[in-house]
């Protein structure tokens, strides 16, 4: 994993789950709304799953980039990043409601950043981070290398999972079966 990858969970966890997701993907938001609490409480926090979020850009790509950067703003460590990502997924529809210009979107994310104690300058600095473009390019290349073209897509211990992994009961069965091996 690259040094700038966002990963939570024990490094000794028997399972490593990689999620390829986009902050503008409604299916990704739905997965997080339906599955995150169980995944975090029963698998990540118990040391059984290590999760890496591989950032992908779906349309509008600039907005997806901006939301990922907001989650990373001010050098957020992985636990804070994942907390922020969860909030952004919960608010995804509201963030884009009544947005007709880039300025409207920017005002929305600056307001969210302010809720987290981030200044306008910190949010803008995250949006203008040169290294972020390189990170997103690497993330896209990793997805391409595995033939991943849609979000969310999940890879468990190197094996790509089916789309049905997004269903809460399938996620639990899949993880439990992998842990039983």
Image (spheres, rainbow, N blue to C red):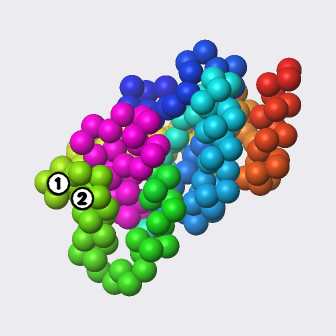
Residue sitting farthest toward the top: 12
Which image quarter holds the C terminus? Answer: top right
Q: Position of residue 171 (x, y in %)?
A: 77, 44
Visible residue check, residue 76 = yes
Residue 82 highlighted magenta (yes or no): yes
Dot 1 corresponds to which residue? 119
Residue under the point 57% across and 60% down: 29
Residue 112 location in percent, x, y?
31, 62
Residue of label 2: 114
Task: Give percent across and percent down for residue 129.
Answer: 23, 45
Mark 1: secondary structure: loop
To which quarter of the image does residue 154 belong?
top right
Residue 26 got which mark?
none
Please report whichever mark, 2 or 1, sits nearer to the chain's N-terminal start. 2
Task: Tell which of 114 and 75 is nearer to you.
Answer: 114
Q: Is residue 21 left or right of residue 121?
A: right
In the image, residue 132 lies in the stretch drawn in magenta: no
The residues tagged by marks 2 and 1 sit, at their Cα atoms, a distance apart of 6 Å
Q: Where does the magenta region start and end?
A: 61-84
């Amino acid at each position: 994993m690259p040094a700038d990858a966002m990963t939570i969970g024990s490094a000794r966890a028997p399972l490593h789950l990689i999620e390829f997701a986009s902050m503008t993907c409604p299916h990704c938001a739905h997965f997080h709304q339906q599955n995150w609490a169980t995944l975090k409480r029963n698998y990540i926090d118990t040391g059984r799953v290590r999760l890496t979020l591989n950032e992908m850009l779906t349309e509008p790509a600039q907005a997806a980039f901006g939301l990922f950067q907001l989650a990373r703003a001010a050098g957020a460590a992985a636990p804070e990043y994942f907390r922020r990502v969860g909030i952004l997924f919960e608010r995804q529809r509201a963030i884009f409601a009544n947005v007709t210009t880039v300025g409207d979107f920017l005002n929305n994310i600056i307001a969210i950043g302010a809720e987290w104690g981030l200044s306008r300058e910190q949010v803008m600095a995250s949006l203008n981070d040169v290294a972020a473009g390189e990170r997103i390019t690497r993330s896209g290349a990793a997805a391409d290398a595995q033939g991943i073209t849609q979000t969310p897509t999940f890879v468990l211990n190197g094996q790509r999972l089916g789309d049905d992994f997004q269903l809460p009961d399938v996620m639990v069965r899949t993880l439990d079966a992998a842990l039983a091996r």
